[in-house]
Image (cartoon, rainbow, N blue to C red):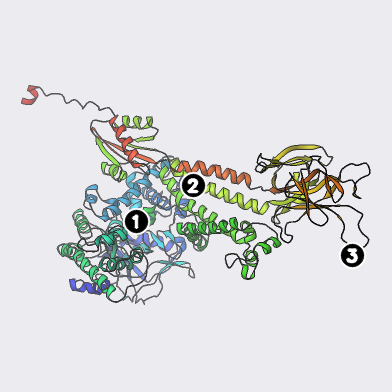
Amino acid sequence: MAFTNITSLSRFGISWPGRTEAPRPIPAVEQVDRPLLEWLSYRGLPPQKVTLSHTLREGRGLLATQYLRKHEKLLNIPGHLLLTADVALQKSAYGKLLERAEVPAWSVLATFLAETRCQPEGAKNEWGVYVDALPMRSGGVLEWSPEEVGLLQGTAAMKAAQRIMLSFELSFVELEPVLEKAVGAACRPLTMDDLRWGFSMLLSRLVRLPSTDMEALIPWADMLNHDPSADCFLDWDAPSSSVVLPPDRNYQAGEQVYMSYGQKSDSEMLLSYGFAPAALSNPHNACSLRLSLREDDPLFSVKRDLLLEADKDGYMDFPLRLDALPQNLLNFADFITTSTPDKRKASAIDQGGSLEGSEKKAAIDLVMEQCKAALASISGTLEGDQEALNKNDNRLSRKKKRKLAQFVARAQPKTVPIQEAPPLSQESFSNRAPRSRNNGGPGPSGPSPLKVAWNRVLRQLSSLPLAIGELAVIAVLSAIGTVIEQNKSLSFYMRNYPDGPDKVIGFVDWQLIKTMQWDHIYSANYFLALMALLAASLAACTSTRQWPMVRVARRWRFAQTPERVYTMAKEGTAAALPNADVRVMGQVLQGSGYQVFLKGGSLYAFKGLAGKLGPIGVHAAMLLIMAGVTYGCLAGLKGTVMVPEGGDFIFAQALSPRSPIARPPSGAYDMLHVNSFDVKYRDDGSVDQFVSDLSVLDGQGRELMRKSISVNDPLRYQGITAYQTDYSMAALTVRAPGSPLQPADGSPFNLPMASLDGKPGIKGKVWATFVPMEPPPADRKASKPRGVSIVARDFQTVALYKTDGSFAGIRRPGSNKPIEVDGMTVIVDDIVGSTGLELKVDPGVPYVYAGFAGLMITTLVSYLSHSQVWALQEGPLVHVGGRSNRATVTFALELNDLMNSIPEQPPAVVPERTAAEVEG
Ligand SMILES: C[S@@+](CC[C@H](N)C(=O)[O-])C[C@H]1O[C@@H](n2cnc3c(N)ncnc32)[C@H](O)[C@@H]1O
């Protein structure tokens, strides 16, 4: 296929430039290079297999001094020659200030370059010779005039240019107040232009060494020029502790050695490095191809609806590289051409997979058709420019630069960067990655492998799909924990989840429950590990995403040009107010709750920063809840007791620790006494409430606390909570003249009650006792004892049965009404109840409560809009732009109202000229 194969470019009459250059005579060292070469050798640069030349098409570059074999290690630059942000921090007069302000690595390096360059001769720091050897200009976009940048209007290259320029401006705004604080620096105060030069040098020379992820300026290696067809990168060689370059081909002595600055498109090259590779020589060039559904397709509306359902528009943009086609492009092309559209196809567009047979052919044909159209427009433009482009060098004249900009603007309507791991990169600058802090490791200033690995782990952990997956698994496990009763005895599970054919829902039996720890799922090791993983994900997301967003939001960002005001507003509200004063605008904004900053005629105002902090608070609150739950699970104690009225126990006897780290609180050694247990009934006879009157007593029996507890109203004492959860019947108080147990004085006596739950044919809460009519027989086996059986289901009535088991009657305890059973009189006086208490010690509760309170507040705060307004005074005009991340319509209305409320200033009075002046 023509477009996946770069050799097909020969049909445009294009061959690879540069790499076919004839070897040159090896030049003698020029006078101008001497200071740099002497400095390099003084700083310990070993003899090299390349030498510096000035007479190359690209300006300076490195020539092989001997035959170089492919893959042989070239260069050998020791680690201490690397200029990293950490080295710059140590050597810079602004080091302490920059360190304290935590500015990004790029800003540290740019400041160091700028200050070194400004230092007077003789007072320069040890990097002075190297910095003086850097070019005055790189040709990159930071050095372009607004008019030149304007030539990119309407292109994606414009966006990239703006991103780079905005990053520089943000860096400057951040650096300016820091640098102002410096006293006694060895150079004059640094200006915006000084720093612009510093950043421009970084953009065109900073190297990222892929294997250590370290960014540094590398003297000597930064003399290598770029060749789009080269495939070799600078890298850190751990065994030799130096920077090396393994060439991707053999070089003759005198030939220029090239490296690759990364798989970058022409526009990226132009913006960062100030040159564009010869036309069509760059296989990494990319343009955006838009594929859309065809309106003449009879299945148009079916396909459009399917795409909408799959959350997609009727068109898709694809970054197209001459040497590769993305799979989702083919999938989308297949969807456009298919005669059997379905849900699966629509939602699988962004997935991998490969197409087969006729589907693949139809998809490729469509892509080819569109590509041809796109390429025809590119090649048409190129032919006219080719001559000019082929002659480009790195000291671009204004005219040439304009020409190149036009080329980028016309030839690449939408250039999209699509490559990985470029060694020379402006990415960290544009993304404003924070300065790396070096904690030791190989090389003098590279991040340790540990740090690289740590960053990778952080990135993985903060992935949203991972966090959603973790939450989903926790939700499923919590559902299991809600359905299956927790922390019951083994016999409970054996009874309720039998094995064999009666398994619950066909597969859940007690063995599975025990093996999977579903009987205590919330303290199971894998559940706790999952909680820890979710906590790590939340923390990673906060540190890698949310906190940087807040830091960016906190920066004051002034717009210096009207275009910038409108760019900052993006799709928000923008307007130009005639005869207005930006200071009045500031006062109006301040009156509406904005924080306003004015610098010269430029205004920046914001409100609702808390809205950006809200999500961090949400994460912190969730972490607190999880920490509280985990702490409660590990350091908690729990237990259940059944205590008869009048009975007591020491808390610690009933509490068992949930893990070895759990410790009973000091109050656990006090005693709980049950003064009474009462069941309250409604008029219809149903149970209304169970009430236990409890007292906490100390070792000497003194009452420390007393409370009547009921369901949902527990007793809380020194971290111990006693819940009313159960009841039982302990004894029946009766009088039974004629029974051998009846005391002689006729007073009532107690008969213990036993639960019948689980006895054949009986389920639920039923208790019974027996009033004997005669002393127990000598041979208990031979004859059954005679007596009255009394059965109770609740505390209101009891049923009495004769010796032969037949029903005798019902009585209310305490009614004093006797009943005659088999000749014996029985009076039921009372049922003595037992209260069932559940005891819990959960030291995590305060944290969980605090977490939930925090969660409610921070969730609300997250909904606050973060609104920003920029304004710039330009003569009598004030350009205003604003945007908000939420409630955009309300914000637009509010900003419009604010703008309308700004009083119009009287226009400046132009004195009328006198007749004499006119004549004169
Ligand atoms: C890392 S420096 C290389 C050394 C540089 N030639 C010098 O004199 O310092 C990068 C700069 O070299 C120039 N450069 C590199 N490769 C080039 C190429 N293929 N064509 C034109 N200029 C190139 C650009 O000006 C770029 O900003």
Q: Is residue 879 above or below residue 88?
A: above
The percent coordinates of residue 785 (x first, y second) are 87, 58
In terms of image quadrants, where is residue 585?
top left
Secondary structure at numbered mark 2: helix
Of residues 873 and 730, the one nearer the viewer is 730
The percent coordinates of residue 350 (x first, y second) are 35, 64
Inspect this view and state whether residue 835 appears.
yes
The percent coordinates of residue 669 (x first, y second) are 78, 46
Q: Give how far apart the Cα atoms at labels 3 and 1 are.
A: 107 Å
Image marks 1 and 2: residues in contact by CB distance under 8 Å? no
Of residues 854 and 567, the one nearer the viewer is 854
Relative to 811, 500 lies left or right? left
**Circle nearer the N terminus (3, 1):** 1
Amino acid at circle 1 = Leu
What residue is drawn where x is 30% and y is 32%?
897
- Mark number displayed over residue 706: none
**Seen from this angle, which residue lies furthest left?**
919
Amino acid at circle 3 = Ala
- Mark number displayed over residue 782: 3
Nearer the observer, disc 1 or disc 2?
2
Amino acid at circle 2 = Ile
In terms of image quadrants, where is residue 16?
bottom left
Question: Which quadrant contains ligand 1?
Answer: bottom left
Image marks 3 and 1: residues in contact by CB distance under 8 Å? no
Q: Ligand 1: does it lie within 8 Å of the C-beta at label 2?
A: no
**Circle nearer the N terminus (1, 2):** 1
Q: Residues within 10 Å of mark 2 (few under 14, many from 20)?
A: many
